[in-house]
Image (tube, grey):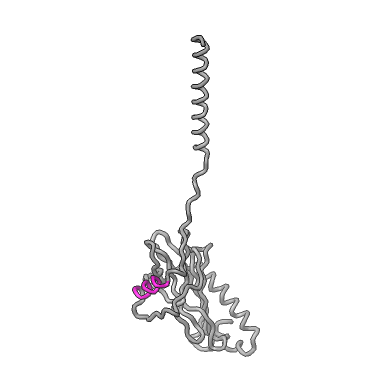
Amino acid sequence: MNQKVYVNVVLVIIIVILGGALGYLMLVKKSPPAAQQTPTTNWGSLTPDIKIALEKALPEKTFRDENVRVITEEDVTDDGSPEALVNIGCGATTCELVLMRIENNEPTVARFKLKEGEISYLVLTSGIGGAGRYGSDTKLIGDKNAIYYSGYSAYNESGDFCGAQVYQWNPQTNIFEFNNSLSNEASKDYCSKICSEKALDPNLKPYFQRICH
């Protein structure tokens, strides 16, 4: 092989190597990043840890193993790990619920900033009693990053009430804070629904005169 041919062959080899390297770099640059793993929480396996967290946050209450159970889950904080509404016990008609979340890889009772500004834990309720004359409901609303707590009592007495409290997640404080506008909106919708339902029952209608006028 003469010198000219040898040089040409070497140039072709160099061009092929450079072209391959450039193509590889472009491919790597355009390749989408690997999908990130979304953290998951198996609340069903955390019952012992849930009970420990409950006893720490609410030492005045007694928690029986057979009563502590997760009833619903939803990611209302947008952190990829669902929060859980945990049943802590039921009476004849109403169950008590506590909102829990994962913090530092451990279950913890969620904190709330109340309308008056106090920061506290909340024990919420769900159920209907008094032959339909009182009731309450607790829901997690993911698209609002909030928990809705609503209730009513209707005995045609001065203590009758109907309304809702909405607590929205604040990622800066890591607290569910009372939201006045959402609470007013939820109260209007909830009480309108309650009143329309009870108005159909002639046996209940007289008891709802104070909250359904």
**Where does the magenta region start and end?**
47-56
Q: Main secondary structure of the magenta part?
A: helix
Image location (x, y in percent) of residue 45? 44, 69
Q: Please state, as top left, top right, bottom left or bottom right, where the C terminus lies in the image.
A: bottom right
Q: Is residue 172 above or below residue 156?
A: above
Quadrant in the rendering for residue 130:
bottom right
Residue occupying the far front of the picture: 1
Image location (x, y in percent) of residue 131? 56, 88
Count of marks placed on residues = 0
Residue drawn at x 54%, y 69% as measured from the top left: 185
Q: Nearer the viewer, residue 140 or 197?
A: 140
Image location (x, y in percent) of residue 52? 36, 73
Q: Nearer the viewer, residue 161 or 107?
A: 107
Q: Nearer the viewer, residue 38 or 21?
A: 21
Determine whether, in the image, residue 205 is placed left or right of residue 150: right
Quadrant in the rendering for residue 55:
bottom left
Q: Is residue 210 above or below residue 40?
A: below
Q: Is residue 55 magenta?
A: yes
Q: Nearer the viewer, residue 72 or 181?
A: 72
Q: Is residue 181 magenta?
A: no
Residue drawn at x 34%, y 78% as measured from the top left: 59
Determine whether, in the image, residue 205 is placed left or right of residue 8: right
Determine whether, in the image, residue 46 is placed left or right of residue 150: left
Residue 167 visible: no
Image location (x, y in percent) of residue 117? 38, 70
Residue drawn at x 51%, y 21% as measured from the top left: 13
Residue drawn at x 50%, y 83% as measured from the top left: 94
Residue 142 visible: yes
